[in-house]
Amino acid sequence: MTNEYLLTAEVRTGTGSADSSRLRNENKIPAVLYGGGKDPAHIALDHDPVMHSLENEAFFSNVLSVKLGKKTEKVVLKGVQRHPSKPRILHMDFQRVSAKEKIIMRVPLHFVGEAVAPGVKAQGGLVSHHISDTEVSCLPADLPEFIEVDVSSMSVGDVLHLADLKCPKGVELVGIGADRENTPVVVSIHMPRAAVEEEAVSEEEAEPAPVETGE
């Protein structure tokens, strides 16, 4: 983790749809803190600073700090409810974290080395991203902002599976069993469809015509 996010919140004195509507009219976001062996806490956040933070990919895969009065709690973002047609946040869910307990989070994948991959640079292939994020399990201090996917050595026809990814120390991919080749495909390099069709036509034209024989 390299980014630090501090959210200043206030405790909500009421709950329910009426209270949530009031908060939204005051340009605030109703939210809840849960987990960590404590009772859920209903809080409110200023809308605009949070909306700005949500523009950063790292906000979704970092341990955040929520300040409530003189107390600060470490949390991760677990849910965001957005307005269907307006740039507004309607509700947020945060899970408390403990430094000694592993958490499961979705983190984005960052693809690097595409321009120099033999399948692209020398063979004219195209890169296809099949998934854009994945679940990891780790202690909060080890939570990565992203996992790097290096495709610089891939050629046309090569496929990289989820189990092939290299994770930072202390980070494990969730759902990886013994059958590593049957884990989801992350990225592949293939020839453009037009090139494949052109090659097929060329092969057909190159085939010798059948020789007719008299009976």
Image (cartoon, rainbow, N blue to C red):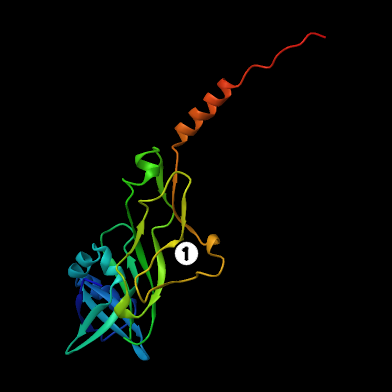
Q: Which quadrant holds residue 109?
A: bottom left
Q: Residue at x 56, y 69 (%)?
A: 178
Q: Residue at x 83, y 9 (%)?
A: 215
18 w.r.t. 155: above or below = below
Q: How packed is label 1: few (under 14 Cα within 10 Å), some, or many (20 or more)?
A: many
Please state the horizontal and vertical placement of residue 108, each as a whole percent of the image. Answer: 34, 63
182 w.r.t. 92: above or below = above
What residue did someone put label 1 on?
Answer: 163
In the image shown, does 132 or 93 lie closer to the viewer? 132
Q: Which quadrant holds residue 86?
A: bottom left
In the image shown, does 137 or 69 lie closer to the viewer? 137
Q: Residue at x 50, y 69 (%)?
A: 176
- Residue type at mark 1: give it: Ala
Please state the horizontal and vertical placement of residue 183, each as a whole percent of the image. Answer: 52, 62
The local secondary structure at tag 1 comes to: helix
182 w.r.t. 105: above or below = above
Please state the horizontal and vertical placement of residue 168, each as a whole percent of the image. Answer: 34, 70
In the rendered image, the quadrant that contains the N terminus is bottom left
